[in-house]
Amino acid sequence: MKIVILWLFVMSLMVSVQAQTNPANIKVDDLTDAQIEQYVKRAELMGYSESQLDGFARAQGVSAFEAQKLKDRLQKIKRNKQQPKNLDTRQQSGNTTTGRQVNGAAQQDSLKNKKLLQDSLKIDENKLKVFGSDLFKNSDITFEPNLRMATPSSYIIGPDDEILLDISGDNEASYKLPVSPDGNITVEYVGKIAISGLSVSAAKNKIQSRLSSTYPAIRSGNTQIDVNIGNIRSIRITLTGAVTKPGTYTLPSLATVFNALYASGGPGENGTYRKIQVIRNNQVVTTIDLYDFLANGIQRGNIRLQDQDIIHIPVYGSRVQFEGEVKRPAIFETVSGESLLDLVKYAGGFSEDAYTAKIKVLQKTDKERSVKDIYADQFADYSPKAGDQFIVEPILERFANRISILGAVFRPGLYGMEPGMTLKQLIEQADGVREDAFLERGIINRLRADNTAELINFNVRDILAGTSADIPLKREDKVEIASIFDLRDEYKFTVQGEVRLPGDFPFASNATLGDLIQKAGGLNEAAKNARIEIARRLKNRDVTDPSSSQTIQVDIKDGIVSDLTVELQPYDVITVLGDAGFRTQRQVKIEGEVLFPGIYTISREDERISDIIKRAGGLTSYAYTEGASLKRTGVSKLKAEEKKEKERLKKEMAKDSVEEVDSEDEFDKETTAVNAKNSALAKVSQQQGASATEIEPSDLVGIELNKILINPHQRGDLLVLDGDIITVPKELETVKVMGEVLNPNNVVYVKGKSLKYYVNQAGGFTDNALKKRVFVQYANGAVKGKDGAYPEVKPGAEIVVPKRAPREKMNVQAWVGLGTGIASLAAIIVSLLRN
């Protein structure tokens, strides 16, 4: 006896430890995301897909309600992983949180990520470039010479040019004459003519003079000559100094300075844009200021180059930085004689938000930096110095004379405050108050000198009548005049029941029952012979009176309402009841092994399953009556509607919980608000979970069709309802084995074999199988568990083997506790033995 007591004590301790991890006691809301993912991996190892996760959970003893929540949590985790990764270091630390906490953290991180993105954009904007640095690096802009243009008369001819000589009039001839290395061309019947170093115009005159002896008609004008350049020669140009790619370049002889700069990449990082020199025969023939082209589009000094010309780009002399509210912020190069006004022009002028009264300049002295304000009247006199950093600040985000009026006025909105403007003048500018204005009190929201808020109330009626002193307005005053409708509940009527357009309708004085029925689209067919009930609120009800509302009844006969003149009051609820004798067509569907499967309309109130089978022509020879099932969709439809409504409410709450913020203070406030709303959402979810039933209603009804057909209209032969689906399958030949077996699969049905046979065909029980809780779900939807012996197996059945609660590994404390208990029990036993 004493040994039995000891054994019972030890077993009670073990059971208490195992109960802590019993799957039947698992609450999904208490699981972390990592635990849920581990649970899914375990299901996959057992042969279950994600879509079969609820079946795996049910096999372990988890309730249907928690199994559905498990699938929902898994979908939420997958959605969170598809969102951009959080930048919050708290998330990167690997802390495990519940699904609701992860949701809140993701919202916070999205807000912080937005702020970081804005900061990074500001940093990029501050990286200014040298004005004009992209000119010769832009692939969309080229300065290639146009070789198809007419030859300029000032073009200097040189060796390797090709002269096109055309003779027309009394004499006709054409020649292509190359210029020889010694500068001559050879004309038929004339001989050599030296033209190297001559312009096209001078060469034409010389050729014409030489040809006149051969063609006398040239003197009389009856013969004309035309001289052009065919193929032009190449010239070699050298670029030196602070050039992006210095060196010697071979260019067409029509090339200009800009062509050479484009070929070389233009000035380098330290090259000047203001004093580019063209050197010819050791003399500077022109100096180019690229700012003429960059700012005004004028190519001043862009001369045509000659062979052996040198383009020299010195290093820049002085650069300043111009940033802020200008249209073209950049680093500009300045030259002697330029003023700050010139720099403003180079920068494209001020932007629309610029504070133009002054420009702030950060100067560099011999020892340190200094700050100076340059006012608008000093722009033309200030000479920029090397290293100056000019900043154009934006105008203040405030209004010098803004006031506003809101509420029950005809033109609410913003207004400009004139000197000495009063409250009455503002109301008149807003075209006066509306008819629904509450005239007993208005409010002025005013900012004091220290920016604290102050409320000033006034009587609207007295202000307009002049019986009260008018109130002078100040900058940023906000006047509010309420509507009488804003100060009371919204009056309405509610129409429900058998009308075409049920719903809420706005209140209107003198509205009658007939008016509201018309607004609701009139009565429908079900109200032809029925009744209308008007439920009215009780005012000033005696607390001892048990009545909660007043009810007015109006009869309907042959679609005619007996009294349509009943005057309605605010919040009246008009319910149009239906006719008990009215019925719409209700239908059931029968499918499978019947002679005429299809949709049948219920013809009698007492029509049953056997009647529908009879109307369908009876069963075929292949019908398997034991597997026949009835699917009743009414319960599932109602459940789906309830679930859809809950999801809609949750989405609305979640949508309201995140708003955009623009400052760090607003971010902190928004984070607090998000956490508070997430907590409220979590409480709602817990309340819904606590009130929900543990097992969701099934839409399958277990029927025994063979007994129904033998004894029709007896117990079990159910009345059919609208939407019922009767399924009569063929002979089923397999049995599905799922849950805690080594190889869950479908096994061929063998008549007379026990449940254990099918489990063995699936590999046998696993070590975690809870054998005493094995149950069988038959093809008709009926479920049978173990009652002494294992339940009988029939074709099409599903054998579900639940999982036993996992045994938790005992830690040191648990073993110490167990040892202490055993020692205490041993001491008791020894004490008993001594006695």
Image: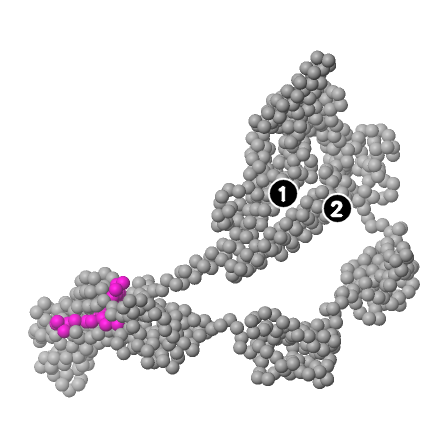
Image position of 718 with respect to 91: above or below: above
Query: What secondary structure is found at the residue carrying circle 1?
Result: helix
Q: Amino acid at mark 1?
A: Asp
What residue do we see at 87% from left, 41% from top? 606
- Give the distance between the C-alpha atoms of the residues marked 2 and 1, in whole angstroms: 20 Å
Q: Position of residue 318 (x, y in %)?
A: 27, 70
| Up-down relation of residue 803 to residue 368 (above or below) | above
Of the pair 172 and 635, the residue shown nearer to us: 635
- Residue depicted at x 43% and y 58%: 120
Q: Residue at the far front: name it.
A: 835
Using the rendered view, name the quadrant where residue 35 is placed: top right
Specify whether residue 271 is painted magenta: yes
Residue 72 visible in the shown view: yes
Q: Mark 2: which amino acid?
A: Leu
Q: Which residue is mark 1?
A: 72
Question: The magenta stretch spans which residues?
Answer: 254-283
Question: Are there few (<14), some (14-19), or many (20+) residues within 10 Å of tag 1?
Answer: few
Q: Residue tagged by mark 2?
A: 638
Left or right, 421 with respect to 397, comes to right
Query: Residue visible at 62% across and 28% down?
Result: 806
